[in-house]
Image: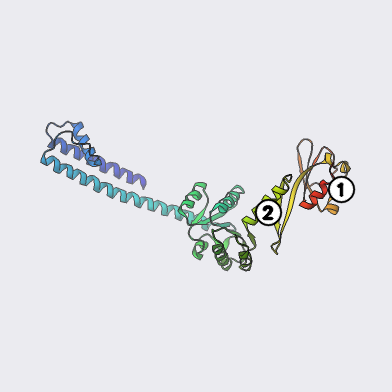
Amino acid sequence: MQLQTRLRFLIYFGSVIFIGSFGFYSLGKDWSVLESVYMTIITLSTVGFGETQPLTDAGKIWAIVVILFGVTGVAYLFSEYSKELFRLDLYRRNKMLKSVKRLHDHYIICGYGRMGAVIAKEMHEKKQHFVVVEFNPEKIRKIEECGFLYVEGDATLEETLIEAGVEKAKGIVVVLNTDQDNLFVSMSIRTLNSDAFLVSRCSVNDTSSKLRRAGVDKIVNPYVTGGHKMSELLLSPQLEDSVTITTPQQTSIDYGIDEIQMSELDQFDGMMVKDCRLREDYELLIVGIIDAKGDVKVNPSSDQVLHRDQTIMVIGKKENLDRLKELMN
């Protein structure tokens, strides 16, 4: 369809330039073909460079006719081009909705702010099927650039959630701008799908209990989670990483993951994992062993023998990791 519009554009203005040039050539006194074409183009474009030669009254009338044809043609073709863009946008939207309707056991991301964008990227990298619900045109353009499926609409409206396939989704995350919207959307989701795993963001702790009563399975406060993480990094910079687990009572338990050189734990050299009694005495678990070549063995057996040229990866509470490090040379 766009090709047809372009052809009409070229044919129309080609004809206007030809007829206009012929008119100026016929009405002008000793006008060359080049001067006639030049006069037609500057008349159509209304740039106002001035006449190449003085115009007769008939020439001035012809110039008015050429301008009217040019302006009318531009308005008509602009209208046609706008219709083509609208039809193209409608076609893309319908195609997108058809793709969304085919989804089953997929994930829905309500909101494409900073958190929503990170979640979508993670889901895409893990090759999961998901759809984003967003109404902001600027964010929609970003979603299109990434090639993600989306539904353009307000997540607080049930019809938008239904378009996103909420009744067939197996997991939904709600990360809108306000706690009120997150609560309202979570409640709407639960009326449409009681089985999907539902995660919601909250910024104020008081909202957490309301979200829980609304049927949200997991609640994430990015400020609390981020604060815990930064505190751990500040107080224990030696930790390779940390994990925060939230209990059903909303109590956070921080676990650290650390790498410890066996050369600093000589008392364990030559022992089997089970004989080290890290689980019994320190409530720590060896989740990996790195040998001298850098090869990693994940989840070693209890009969695995430890050597001083190895590095063990240990997970447990921070205070228990600190207790173990007191044994280090």
Q: Position of residue 13 (x, y in %)?
A: 26, 42
Q: Quickly name the residue at label 1.
A: 276
Quarter of the view holding residue 305? top right
Q: Which amino acid does label 1 sit on?
A: Cys
Residue 86 coordinates in the image, percent (x, y): 38, 53
243 sits to left or right of 3: right
Determine whether, in the image, residue 60 is placed left or right of residue 201.
Answer: left
Q: Where is residue 51 in the image (x, y as percent from the top left)?
A: 18, 36
Instruction: Quickly name the residue at label 2.
Output: 228
Circle 2 crowding by C-alpha within 10 Å: few under 14, some 14–19, many from 20 = some
Say left or right for 5 vs 164. Answer: left
Q: Could you say whether the residue bearing mark 2 is in a helix, strand or loop?
A: helix
**Mark sitting earlier along the chain (1/2):** 2
Which quadrant of the figure contains the C terminus? Answer: top right
Q: Can residue 53 be seen in this view?
A: yes
**Quadrant of the rendered structure where residue 109 is?**
bottom right
Type of the residue with mark 2: His
Residue 6's tag is: none
Q: Left of 223 or right of it: where is 238?
A: right
Which residue appears at 82% of the width and 50% of the height? 323
Tell me what residue is drawn at x 68 percent, y 53 percent. Answer: 228
Q: Element under label 1?
A: helix
